[in-house]
Image (cartoon, helix red, strand yellow):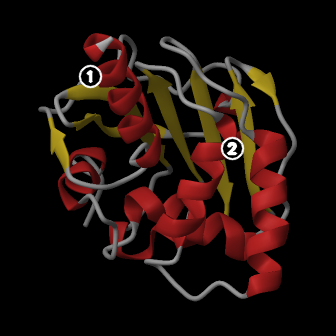
Amino acid sequence: MQRRTILKYSTASATAFALGGAVLLSHAQTPASPQPPTHVAEAVPGAVFSGSARLRFLGFDVYDSALWVTPGFKAANYAQSPLILELTYLRSLGGQAIAKRSISEMRRSGPISAEQEQRWLAAMQQSFADVKSGDRITGVHNPVSGARFWFNGLARAPINDAEFSRLFFGIWLSSATSEPGLRTALLANAPA
């Protein structure tokens, strides 16, 4: 009984902090191939590997992240350049929980109106499936048209809103991120 309670707490805690919170960050994890995922390579021509890291919470591995950016990318102006961010999950998390936590983290980079929150939450819940260990969510930021997502290489509903995309990718790349160590690792090979 006690073991089951501990497992429930661990899963709930990891879900609650899937995109932030008190996190230990391991050293950058280099993906098997520093090439962008083939299913999104055409979306960001010329993208080059920038960095990677593992997000950990309470000793539990949550996901590995990897970032690809375009030549001329500047970290301080991340939202002005196309980029690819891929998260490879290392545990099960609900898509709804990921979307809700995303809204909380997005608020760090800028204000969000009640109307935007409702619209964006609904759009993310459509785009983000429940994940289990080994599942990948790949996001492409386009500063003009917004964000596109893939789940295990299959296209999901895009979110055609440049402001959403800026704030969403700011979860990892904004100087206001809750995880500055993760940001540093993702930007390790990118120009400042």
Q: Locate residue 115, reporting x and y percent.
A: 83, 82
In the image, what residue type sits under mark 2? Gln
Q: Locate residue 44, reporting x and y percent.
A: 65, 43
Q: Is residue 21 left or right of residue 172?
A: left
Label disc, if present, on residue 78 of the rendered structure: none
Q: Locate residue 36, reporting x and y percent.
A: 52, 27
Residue under pointer 1: 30
Q: Nearer the viewer, mark 2 or mark 1?
A: 2
Residue under pointer 2: 96
For marks 2 and 1, the one nearer the N-term is 1
In the image, what residue type sits under mark 1? Thr
The foreground one among 37 and 101 is 101
Estimate the spatial distance between the alpha carbons at disc 2 and disc 1, rounded to whole Å.
Answer: 29 Å
- Residue at screen point 30% across, 53% down: 190
Q: Is residue 65 left or right of residue 23?
A: right
- Residue at screen point 51% across, 34% down: 86
Answer with the quarter of the image where residue 9 lies. Answer: top left
